[in-house]
Image (spheres, grey):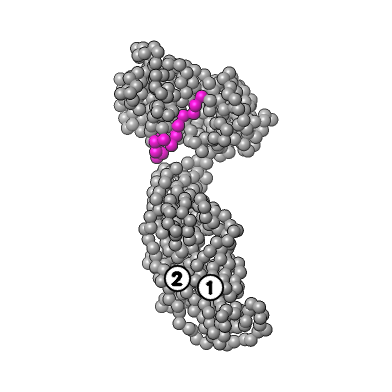
Amino acid sequence: MTKTNLKTMTKLMAAFAVVAALGGACTKEMAPDPTTIRLIRNINATATMPRQSANKAYMHTSDRKVFWQPNDTISINGTAIRTHSIDPNDSTKAEFTGTIGAYTHSGKDCYWAVYPTSIRNSESSSGITVNLPNTQTYNSLKPLSGTTYMVAHTDATPSSYYLGFEMKNLVTVLKLALTSTNGSNDSLSKIVVSHSAQQLYGTFTTAAPTTAISYSSSGGTSITVNCTDGTHSYIDISSAKEVYIALPPLTNSGTLTMQFYNTDDCYTTKTLDMGTGSIALARNTVYAATIDDLAFERVVGKFSVAGKRKVIFSPGNLQYQASTGKWRFAPTQYNYIGSATGNNTATANRATQDGWIDLFGWGTSGYNNTSKDSYATNYQPWATSITSNLNDTNNVYGYGPSTNMTDPNLVGTSANYDWGVNNSIGSDIAGTWRTLTKDEWVWILGPSNSPIPGSDCRTSSTVNGTANARYTEATINTDGTPVNGIIIFPDNYNGGTPSGVTWGTINEGSTWSTKCTSAGWLALEEAGCAFLPAAYYRSGIFVYAISRGYYWSSTHSINTHSYYLFFDNGNVNPSNSNSRYFGYSVRLVKDN
């Protein structure tokens, strides 16, 4: 997860003017309620809001002024009243006319005005209670539609029928300048915002006459902001867009976490550090932050790897291009290079080739540690050849950390031998991803000929009559080309049997007996399943095009071997061991 420091970029005006009294109105005496309401009368009221501010439902997109709109409605002492007229010379001023009850307050009539009327809960002469919603709507045609929650208070003499309100925003407004960088689905559909310590929605109170907000016990720490461009239920953030979010004044230090979702329900997470000040975000202000690196990740399943620890699989197998030194994930979970150009390039051309490769010798992340580990000479991503025996005791062929190192596995002081730890992959920084250990492969797939205690603790829903379903060997047919591999079920799989899926054997090897159409696999993927294609293996320039899967772990076996996951049409073994120079697939995970 990326961390962005919140900086106050913009504070919009917070100065308000009380409007002068308007023209007269008749009165109508009503039976008073001596406990709460002194008098019910017809009145004229004017509510104003400043120009160039964020305190109203609509900010004009061309000159950034704030205007009242026809048919805007405010609640005055619980009575909803629409605009009677808008000042033709200044649309920040509007007149409201209606019949309103007054509260008694210090010998005067007390009035509360609320916008929008939906947030009103109750009011009295001493204060008002409002309910800020847990769901907002951001409309790019009316940028502040979902960010205005206003309250005004005024006292008047019993003989006065002309009221003026200064509408003050209860909330702070966070203005986010957002840009996506992944270039696939850049349609932002919603934002989920949560605070580590403070209530963001629910019941809040203010006290007369300050209208400063305070908190009550009811409410929650997470809100959802749905996005629309006025026609679609999303906004396009392939270029920078400003999104406004209403938040209660943040008086607690802590972390504001935001998850941004596109229309594929892919997401990316960012955090804002609210600092340690007594007021992190003040009421009636607009603060701005820029987040210009949103790279959406598919919402995927979570897989237990020991106790309460869970991981998320990467969206595809790891791939590398020598000519640019770039790493990426395969575009789909079932995509692999196999015997195509790249993996079978002649040795002399591998360091500069344009073709992508996806079959790697063990520990070949490009991490050069030969100054401390003189036997780890084959660290280049394209290295998959047998060289002369470098050291029969510590590292016979020079792949990965030698056994005389403090950490002979791809962890700890040797962690940079791990492809995901050492490298940025796509837009992810180095260290985002890592390789599963041998024991974690066993935990995910279940006991094999090398079971570990507790490895049967990862449970899933019943699939095709099999309880605690972990995997099934399958064929996915997406474009007329069948791809064999293994489907792994996430914890608590609840996808049922989607259309286009015919289940075969569960939790045992088979001849790729589960069959999936394109639509069937998409449904399984959306339910959180991972798919590992049977992507062959290589040695030197030779790629063995046989329908088998070989996936490295981060765990060494002996000085010549390391552990890996193996499967073919009938066998699944998560703790096989073989020579490190073989080119096997790498599928990374992220700790959840």
Amino acid beneath label 2: Phe
Q: Specify whether residue 450 is painted magenta.
A: no
Which is more toward the observer, 526 or 376?
A: 376
- The kind of secondary structure element at disc 1 is loop
Q: Position of residue 573 (x, y in %)?
A: 55, 21
Amino acid beneath label 1: Ala
Q: Position of residue 315 (x, y in %)?
A: 48, 35
Cα–Cα gap, marks 1 and 2: 26 Å
Name the quadrant containing residue 157. Answer: bottom right
Name the quadrant containing residue 394. Answer: top left
Q: Which residue is mark 1?
A: 208
Question: In the image, which residues are magenta?
Answer: 425-438
What residue is rendered at 58% in x and 38% in y?
Answer: 527
| Residue 570 placement, left or right of 341 | right
Point out the tag, 1 or 2, that comes first from the N-terminus.
Answer: 2
What residue is rendered at 64% in x and 31% in y?
Answer: 468
Q: Position of residue 146 (x, y in %)?
A: 50, 61
Mark 1: give few (<14), some (14-19) or many (20+) Cα within 10 Å: some
Can residue 502 be seen?
Answer: no
Residue 216's mark? Answer: none
Which is more toward the observer, 533 or 19?
A: 19
Q: Residue furthest right?
A: 465
Q: Position of residue 274 (x, y in %)?
A: 44, 53
